[in-house]
Image: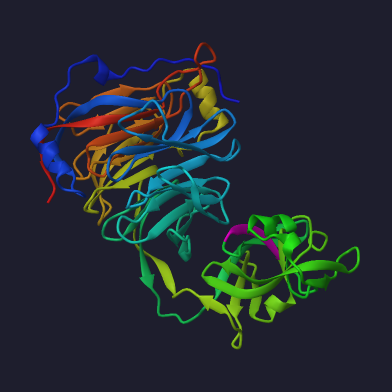
Amino acid sequence: MRPVVVMALVLVASCKTLPKTPPEVLAALQAKPGAYLRGTVAALGSPQVFNREDFVWDTKVSPDSKSVAVSRLGMKSFHLSVFGLEDPKKARADVVVNALEFNVEGLDWSSDGALIAAVSRDRSVRLFDAVNGAQKGAWLTDEALTAVAFHPKAPLLAVASTKGLITVLTWPELGFVAEQRGHTDEITGLAWAPTGELFSSSWDRSVSVWRVEETSSSAKESRARYEKKSGVQVFRAVFDGKASASFVVDTRLPIVVVRSSLAQTAGIDVLSLTESISIPSAMGAQMSRLAKGKSLAFKGLTVRNLDVAVCDACLPQDAQAALGQAFVDRVSIATDESTQEFVLTPKADAGDVSATSPQSLVRARRFTFEGSVNDVSVDASGTVLALALSELKGERTRDVYEREKRKEVEPERPWDCAARVDAQRGTVLENLKGHRGVVSSAAISPDGKTVVSGGWDKKVVLHGAVESQVESFGWSIRRVRFSRDGRLLTVAAWTPQNPLSDHQSDPAAVVYEVVYSEASVSP
């Protein structure tokens, strides 16, 4: 239940006359798709408010700077809302992502602006149509997810977990490419550079730089992480390309067996199936309907043309499906207890078993810092990073909420700051002050010159401008990001709901115009 508190927002930009970016520069920007502004930032200008009643986790502008996506906590569930920037009052699309107990931590736009990816602590990454909000795909991972980023050029999508795991997928089909457990704590941010390098930040006080590379290995093994439930090892696989489900291995069963609910989710009309097979169960042999020509997909491994029995009574309580003897005849399954993973390898004479071309996620560089890294963003050339740092881990605990309730002001600490960082060497170019306590997010302008930071002190700070500017919000800042053309800045914040009148309170999703006093357009 959200706390009932009403706080005031001061939008500095709305109370004074601001300069404008020269119109001839904006016209030149509009005439060059893919270009961005560079130069001296004067201020954050006129703001548009898209939400003033919810906790907003993330908000980002589309590649063409015409739309904004918002991840928000509504009254009963998490939502993904899409607005046209010309009309902030009415959402163009608004879809329920999941229930209240699973935060929708991050979102991103595909490079063509057609899709929006959202990741959640329910372990899912989902793709949505950017126009109407229709779900276009989903992948359920092994761990709760905290960050997502589309590659700016290649059809790749990276997601990151609370346990330091980075997974790279293809899109729009969400096929597995590679993964690496790159951090020892929660991953807080992902950012692709146009060079193809992927930057990841973590509470383990580090930033890692990754490349997706072809490997020389000819091995076709796939790994599936399992967890023990009620004495059985449960893992996940994608059934018939449509539904991610929990599986067990049970060679007492002759073939793959699935629950009727999973079959229906995968689009199988169970009642129309005409063939049957006898399947053993705790209650004796069960005559079960038979579906032919189905598939199972694991990380990097797909098995096709499987016969599948539909039987609810044949499965343990914690499983939606089981791999029987017919599957094991085609794929060997070994157990790696050190990593709690099953290792699946096609047998030499197995038919209809395919593996993706071997690729791996290779660490190119790793940088360490004196504070926890709560966010990372990268400029358009891939040469400068913006980091959000804090000496204490940026984790919202009961102690944090109690301190905020008592209105305690955090002491000044050297590494409660934002920073501009050289992306090749990891050296700090500028240590940027202006916050008390955790700095939760940091955005770098496309030209790498200007940083905007947000913190738990309810402030958004514009650094590196003609004059520093501070925008005050009602509660903690969740995310700040520049648009790809550098013309706009989004802010996502939590706002306590006002239980009175129209229930509206402090702005939670805001888009600012970025004003340049001296600007040009990138080549």
Q: Which residues are magenta?
A: 242-248
Q: Quadrant of residue 46?
A: top left
| Residue placed most toward the observer, 258 or 215 | 258
* Magenta-colored stretch includes residue 244: yes
* Magenta-colored stretch includes residue 4: no
Going 85% across and 70% down the picture, which residue do you hit? 280
In the displayed structure, 373 sits above or below 366; it is above
In the displayed structure, 242 sits above or below 81; it is below
Res. 445 visible in picture: yes
Res. 414 visible in picture: no
Residue 406: x and y in percent read: 51, 17
472 vs 185, left or right, is: left
In the displayed structure, 44 sits above or below 101; it is above
Going 23% across and 50% down the picture, which residue do you hit? 380
Q: Quadrant of residue 211?
A: bottom left
| Residue placed most toward the observer, 407 or 505 | 505
Going 14% across and 31% down the picture, which residue do you hit? 21
Residue 354: x and y in percent read: 53, 77
| Residue placed most toward the observer, 41 or 288 | 288
| Residue placed most toward the observer, 31 or 371 | 31
